[in-house]
Image: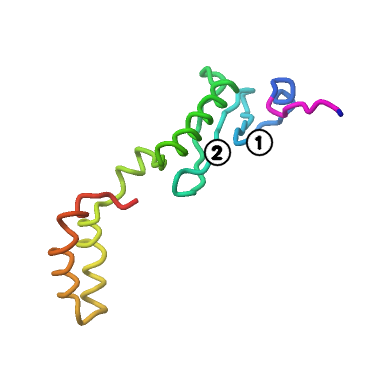
Amino acid sequence: MAKRVSKLTLRYRRKLKPGEQVQENGIRYRARENGDGTWFIRYHDAANRPVQETVGRVGEGATLDRAKELLLDRQAAVQNEDFIYTPKRAKEKLPTVAAFFERDYMPWSKAHKRTWADDQSRFRLYLAETFGDHRLD
C-alpha cells in the first residue's frame, strides 16, 4: 500500500498559485500573492455550528504544527467544556435581551398585536431580571 502524502507539506504548498487553497483534516492553507500563506482551522463548536478561525500568516510565524495544536485544543475544549465560539468583535455587537426587546420586539409588537401590553408586562415580571443582561447568542 502506497504511503499517503499530506497536501499540507511545504513541497505541495509551494506549487499553489495565489488564491488557491488546500484543506485536510480541519486545517486549511490559502496561498497569497506575495508568496506568503495563511493557516485556518475549521471545527464545530458545542452548538454544532461550523467555526473557522485564522491561525495566522506564515510570514508572521504561523506553522502547520501550530495549526494542528490549536485545532486539537479547540476540539478538546468543545468536548470537555461545551465550548461555543463567539469572536470578541461579534460578541460586543450582540445586543442584550432587554435591549432587543425594547428596540426591536416592542415596536413590532405594538404595530402588530393587540396584546402588546401583556408582552411588555410578562417580560418585565418574568424575564427581564433573569435574562435581561444576557447577550443574544
Label 1 crowd (10 A; few <14 / some 14-19 / many >=20): some
Q: Which mark is residue 134?
A: none
Q: Residue furthest front?
A: 80
Position in image of residue 59 (x %, y %)? 55, 19
Residue under the point 51% across and 43% down = 44
Start-end of magenta stretch: 2-8
Q: State which quadrant residue 104 falls in.
A: bottom left
Disc 2 residue type? Arg
Q: Is residue 130 above or below residue 23?
A: below
Spot occupied by residue 103 in the image (x, y as percentages of width and height) = 22, 61
Q: Is residue 56 above or below residue 131?
A: above
In-front residue for pair 49/39: 49
Label 1 to label 2, Cα distance in Å? Answer: 10 Å
Query: At x 48% / y 49%, what residue is drawn?
Result: 49
Number of other residues with Cα within 10 Å of mark 2, as a class: few under 14, some 14 to 19, many 20 or more: some
Marks 2 and 1: in contact by CB < 8 Å? yes
* Label 1: element kind: strand
Q: Which mark is residue 23?
A: 1
Residue that badge 2 annotates: 42
Name the residue at the right extreme.
1
